[in-house]
Amino acid sequence: MSSVLDLARPDLRALDPYVPGAYEPGMIRLNANESPWRAPGDTTERGLNVYPPPRPFALRDRLAAHYGAPPEEILVTRGSSEAIDILIRGFCRAGQDDILICPPTFDMYRVYATIQAAGIVRVPLLRREGRFELDTPAVLDALGGRVKIVFLCTPNNPTGQSIPPADVEAVCAAASGRALVVIDEAYHEFASTNYLDLRRRYEHVVLLRTLSKFVSLAGVRCGAVVAAREVVEYLGNVLPPYTFPTPSIELVLEALRDDSLRVSAERIAVIKRERERLAQALRDVPDVLEVYPSDANFILVRTRDSALFRGAAHRAGILVRTFADPAVADCVRITVGRPEDNDRLLEAVARTERP
């Protein structure tokens, strides 16, 4: 029976990973060339004068409990962006292998593939009847050959729409033995879909999660790979040790306490209500031609003039996002803010003046 690691780079599968100095509580560390003194003002529990754990296993275990996955199937990364990087480096040989993406989508797939000199196969989303839709037959036709990773972002950034689960599973089934399917769930908590069942049924399916959105920790940069145990072990050899710093570990563990998660859940409920209110109000703005449905913490709107819309928001002290991609060049992505922030935006764009 073939292994999912048959898809990995043969040269890296044979890599002997770096072995850091051991850490044992209560023992004096004279094995890692660290300072024996704490820095002034260091109030961390572990101490910043010593390296963080090579892998933050306490944090991994807490995330595993939160996500409902075995700890051995979790790899903690610096945001989901780092996960994208190590997946491409670990499975794509420079100049020989490709990734498959469905633009408009998160641009870091393209960036990391380019850095690795991997090819990029693009199967654009279909834009019809007020939605962006996955062109599933075209994705299936593009599988094979050099494609080693298929990236499916759901809910998708920047369009905000979830991919129907049946379409996701069709891609997973077709890619078996041929490519990894990486389901990027950066906005998972704002949607109703959950792909852990697919992860359990298909060894080549990888999920990406992040704490940047739902527990308000974008500045900490904590993400996670949820994958088959052998994939996690392999990616752990690609990822250097000591990548996740001590203060971040302690902050994230605090954020994952039950009382903190209750606050996060309450805030998500507010974001969802504001998302619907903001979407409805934007439909009445003269320069807005279309408001696309969203399962994320943002809304994409098609405008008569995206630069004009952005300028009106900017004059009111608000930043919104526009894009160079021709598929969304006339669109503006608006993060759902606090109610007062959303009111301020609506007031600004309602009186947009044309030159």
Image: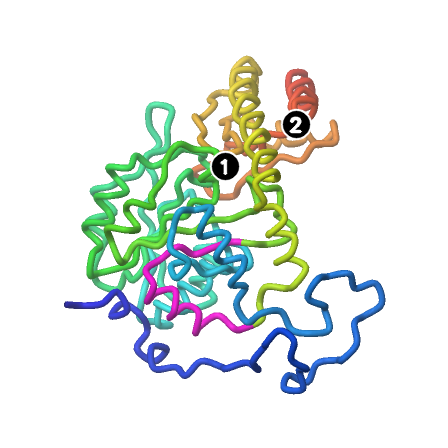
The amino acid marked with disc number 1 is Ala
Magenta segment = 223-241
Q: Residue at x 30, y 58 (%)?
A: 180
User: Nearer the observer, disc 1 or disc 2?
Assistant: 2
Q: Is residue 77 above or below residue 239?
A: above
Quarter of the picture holding the C terminus? top right
49 above or below 86? below
Crowdedness of circle 1 by 10 Å Cα count: few (<14), some, many (20+)?
A: some
Residue at image position (55%, 80%) is 20
* Tag 1 near tag 2, CB within 8 Å: no
Q: Cα distance, mark 1 to mark 2?
A: 26 Å
Q: Earlier in the sequence, mark 1 or mark 2?
A: 1
Q: Position of residue 72 (x, y in %)?
A: 39, 62
User: Of 100 and 194, which appears nearest the observer?
Assistant: 194
Measured as percent of width and height from the top left, residue 68 is found at: 40, 47
Residue drawn at the location 53% of the way across and 32% of the way down? 298
Q: Give the secondary structure at mark 1.
A: loop
Specify the quadrant of the image occupied by residue 105: top left
Q: What residue is shown with label 2?
A: 338
Q: Which residue is mark 1?
A: 329
Q: Nearer the viewer, residue 33 or 154?
A: 33
Instruction: Give SS at disc 2.
Output: loop
